[in-house]
Image: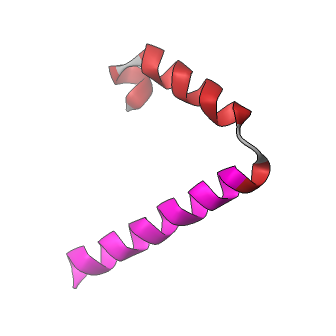
């Protein structure tokens, strides 16, 4: 949805992500997945 709503901001975000190292991207992905699982437990709980 972000590319549709704000293409410029999306481009900036992708450029920033491309500057990060592999481990930083993995850590961010892990944190986002854990947050998603927690939110699911709260919503479904």
Which residue occupies 70% across, 32% down?
A: 18
Residue 43: quadrant of the picture: bottom left
Q: Residue furthest bottom?
A: 45
The question of residue 34 being in magenta is answered with: yes
Rendering quarter of residue 7: top left
Residue at (46, 14) in percent of width and height: 8
Quadrant of the rendering where the N terminus is positioned? top left
Left/right placement of residue 7 relative to residue 19 reads left
Marks counted in the figure total 0
- On the image, the x and y values in percent for residue 12 come to 54, 21
Magenta stretch: helix, strand or loop mostly: helix
35, above or below 22, in the image: below
Look at the image and give the residue range highlighted in magenta: 24-45
Magenta region includes residue 20 = no
Compared to residue 7, the image places residue 35 above or below, namely below
Taking depth in this image into account, of 24 and 5 the one nearest to the observer is 24
Q: Give the residue drawn at x 68%, y 52%.
A: 24
Q: Which residue ends up furthest to the right in the rendered image?
A: 22
Using the rendered view, name the quadrant where residue 29 is placed.
bottom right
Left or right, 35 with reference to 16: left
* Residue lying at 67% horizontally and 50% vertically, measured from the top left: 25
Across and down, in percent, residue 28 comes to 58, 55
> Looking at the picture, how far across and down is residue 23, in whole percent?
75, 56
């Amino acid at each position: 949805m972000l590319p549709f709503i704000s293409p410029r901001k999306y481009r900036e975000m992708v450029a920033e992500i491309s500057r990060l190292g592999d481990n930083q991207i993995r850590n961010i992905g892990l944190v986002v997945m854990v947050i998603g699982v927690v939110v699911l437990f709260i919503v479904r709980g």
